[in-house]
Amino acid sequence: MTVHSTWKEKVQLKKDQLNSKIKDEWKLNSTTITRLKNDKKNLIKNIDDLCSSSENQITHSTIMALRQALEAKELSCHEITAAFCHRAALIHQVVNCLSEIMFSEALRLADYYDSNRPAILPPLYGIPISLKDQCNVEGVDTSLGYLCRTFKPKTKNEESLIVSFLRDLGAIIFVKTTVPSSMMATDTQSNTFGYTYNSINLSFSSGGSSGGEGSLIGAHGSLLGLGTDIGGSIRIPSSYQGLFGLKPTFGRVPYLRVDNSFEGRETIPSVIGPLARDLSDLRYFMSCVINICQPWVQDVKCIPYHFDSSTSKLHDNYVVGIWYGDGVIDPPPSDIRALKTCEDLVNKTKGMKAVKWEPSSELSRELFDLANEADVADSGNEIKNEFEISGEPLLDILKPMVLENGRPPYTVNEWWDLTKRVYNAQQLMRDYYLSFPESERPDVIISPTTLMPFRPGDMLKTTLRYILLFNVLNFPSLSIPVGSVDCQIDGLMDTTSALNPEDKMIKTYWNDLIQSGEIDGFPIGLQVVSPTFNDNEVCKFASWLFSKI
Amino acid sequence: MTVHSTWKEKVQLKKDQLNSKIKDEWKLNSTTITRLKNDKKNLIKNIDDLCSSSENQITHSTIMALRQALEAKELSCHEITAAFCHRAALIHQVVNCLSEIMFSEALRLADYYDSNRPAILPPLYGIPISLKDQCNVEGVDTSLGYLCRTFKPKTKNEESLIVSFLRDLGAIIFVKTTVPSSMMATDTQSNTFGYTYNSINLSFSSGGSSGGEGSLIGAHGSLLGLGTDIGGSIRIPSSYQGLFGLKPTFGRVPYLRVDNSFEGRETIPSVIGPLARDLSDLRYFMSCVINICQPWVQDVKCIPYHFDSSTSKLHDNYVVGIWYGDGVIDPPPSDIRALKTCEDLVNKTKGMKAVKWEPSSELSRELFDLANEADVADSGNEIKNEFEISGEPLLDILKPMVLENGRPPYTVNEWWDLTKRVYNAQQLMRDYYLSFPESERPDVIISPTTLMPFRPGDMLKTTLRYILLFNVLNFPSLSIPVGSVDCQIDGLMDTTSALNPEDKMIKTYWNDLIQSGEIDGFPIGLQVVSPTFNDNEVCKFASWLFSKI
């Protein structure tokens, strides 16, 4: 048996294991799968057609509404859990978004809850929650898209703290979702689990690295799930599937015992946070995890604070910064239109004011460079090793991460130099922020995020220039959906006036998407950001915004 | 001119520069200096004799009392500043504790304040504050004890944020104080500034790395100064000079633009905090810097919080952990006696209870090892380079920091592995903490600190086993003086029952200090610690303790 056949056989074993967790009556025949795959923009409706109306009522609901129905005994935990398991199974067969399936465990727990119903329902009682693959759950793998990590189920002691919190809160864990191997890419793909498609438009990538979450929630296969974000991994899939996704300030949601790449890398750290269809659900979830579970008691990296989910009332003289572009890459017409919508809304509201947010291009470049340099500081050693253990071939999407030019990993001194530059860049942004007169200093900033979707294989034709900087800055950022692309209204970009080769590439790709018509109706994603620790402000403002849009 | 003579000449130039800042009438003749140096245990009294009674009244006062006198116009800023400048100059000539002298600038500012007195006095109006050499002040060097960094005065823009805060608060900066070159030693010594002696007992080291601060404040040459602590550098000189010294949680006092070794090293970071004679002064100072200056607005590494200086009232059912030893090194009889005093006091107070704090020796060892490994992660490259630039010879005290065995600096992967171990050790300590039933979980812990002083040259005969772990843990720690060594009461240790060779070395050194009688009357230092972020609790408890002792 050659090494080649060995890894492929192991992949097949893992696929079989996953597939065996879907009961036969939920399996789609190949004709249906092909039909659904070809109907690019209608997955939600097509899945609706395969489910009962009572199931659709559940899966198109919100956590808050389901909780009311549970309290009123109009629904059982079993009904809710079964509806989401069924729908997740169907979606998965089209977009390939699940890495671990725990339907039977979930239904068993739901039944237990139904027959042991407490007088006061715990905050997330009977609510199914999905998890990015990184979260450790007893009895299932955390493979991170690496074949070598499959078939090593986690023990009870290895469970992520956030998972034990979810159990304490009464939530029902039912699936883990796909990631690109290593999570260090924005396209969700692995030799083991294959490719995860966008559930809003199957022509496109789900984004990544929390791509499985994005695609699952996007098609109503879950109401809320946990993702992580070291370079957009929550915000990108949220943007690409029209969801709300919160990248909190570091130390808000506990990362303890969540597996990761580059563990021990504390500069530009990965953070964990929710993706959700509904903003009230997202805020409610955060308030449960933080105010009730108090993660700082158990995870030394968490910072004590209160998550405010109670109000969307903004203070007087509220200032909103609008970022129309970094001077390096022009956002497309759809983003400009969405930003203008927000700006107009702010300016026509009494007691509110929009200002231009215009940090220097030089600082934007430095922040972007820092994130990229940090990601290849070890020259790709870790990723390379993980692939070599199983013999699976390195993926194209990870080739930029694995340096082939023989540059050795950074020394600790080089790493400290980079860390110093990070601090310096953070301070320069703080200086810019403080350069506003106090009456014009933004409470929040609205920024572009992904700019546009990409087709499988085209990851490098888009840019992370409006994404990575907020990781370097450790600014909380909430991904928000603001309308959708209209090929007629948004139109082509002028590539002849491109600012630089990268800008030209982006504009050319945009034009391609417009000309093909594929992008028509695709969600426009923006992000609401604010300086470190202002998580509450970001969410509060977004709630206000969505009460008006 | 040989390299050898070059560096010595430059040293002489720096010494001359420093010396020129002391006016002639404050200069001691060599007979007096010799007399004072030989009278090891009476420096304070001897300096008192050289000052006027009104000067002594000022320098033996507190910030709170001086502020009252300023408010009542019983004293002027000039009188206060002149008294401290004079006394600092005298002390320096015996113990060698100053690296930069700013007497004329200080007096000029004092005069300005006197003739432009505001209606409401700023919080630190007219109070002289001393600074560890690391703090950048316009117009003077920050040499860190490195010859190559002398004669490079800092500009206004380079001033440390904490320095600008002090200016805003009305404080008067009058001196910067000595450090061991690089600050990575606990004995304060450099080729440029020489050796800093202990001002309580000139037979001993001032400790370090904030040794100049400790020695200056110890002999009433300043009421309060700023030090830094990456491995005991605030707590050790505080302990050795009978002072209060607070190593806060990281992110409390701003480190922005404070020069340092290993800048960019964020694992086991250096923190900045006050050393003071009086605990109320220390708490008042912290409340000014934090509550008024709000450092998190300008320094992105600072965390918003309120420093509570208002009360020493403890909550009901207060639990105090007492740490009688780590099972690796036995604390000496003096520490045991001081710990028992505290334990008895707690136990006889209604609503309070003492419990034994006994984390595993294995965990203590790991925490100690981690700090040591972090300190030599770059194999001493940075320190070596700094010495090579000027050609000055490497100091013996730094030889453990500069690896000569050719081991290359850590790669970034090795550094991340170490960082992971740090997090793991922090979590193990948190698990131990949470293993107490809630009613017995310590609010604060009282721990040994330095165990005993050391003579010049004997730095490595003492241990940092009760010091370094609290840096790794990021626990706030307040160094407190609890009585003094009594050779009759405390007596010899049994070296035959030593736990290990290191323990034997420590016990032997203790016996040597007892037998020589040198240690008699030396301050006993302990530390009050508490988990990360509990800075307020540590200070509040210590205030309560000192209201009772």
Image (cartoon, coloured by chain):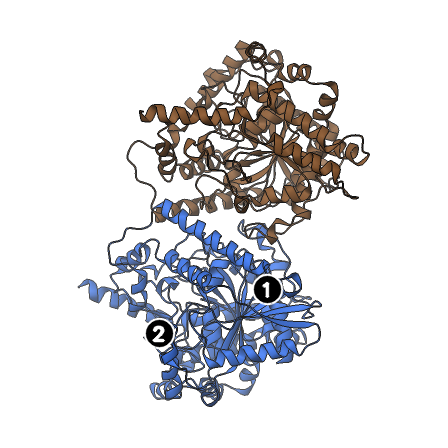
Chain colours: A blue, B brown
Parent chain of label 1: A
- Asked if residue B292 lies left or right of residue B154, the reply is right
Circle nearer the viewer, 1 or 2:
2
Q: Nearer the viewer, residue B264 or B504?
A: B264
Q: Quadrant of residue B527?
A: top right
- Residue position for label 1: A286
- As drawn, B148 above or below B256: above
Other-residue count near label 1 (Cα within 10 Å), few / some / many at <14 / 14–19 / ≥20: many
Q: Quadrant of the N terminus of chain B?
A: top left
Provide residue B353's location: percent of width, then percent of height. 69, 35
Point 36% across, 83% down: residue: A512
In this picture, residue B421 sits left or right of residue A248: left
Q: Nearer the viewer, residue B168 or A95?
A: B168
Q: Position of residue B181 (x, y in %)?
A: 45, 31
Residue B473: assigned label: none
A44 relative to B272, above or below: below
Is residue B92 found left or right of B400 in the rendered image?
right
Q: Is residue B348 visible?
A: no
Which amino acid type corresponds to the residue marked 2 in the rendered image? Lys
| Residue at x 51% of width, y 78% of height | A336
To which chain does the residue with label 2 belong? A
Q: Which residue is mark 2?
A: A461
Label 1 SS: helix
Give the mark, 1 or 2, whose residue is nearer the N terminus: 1
Instruction: Please state which amino acid type lies under the numbered disc 1.
Output: Met
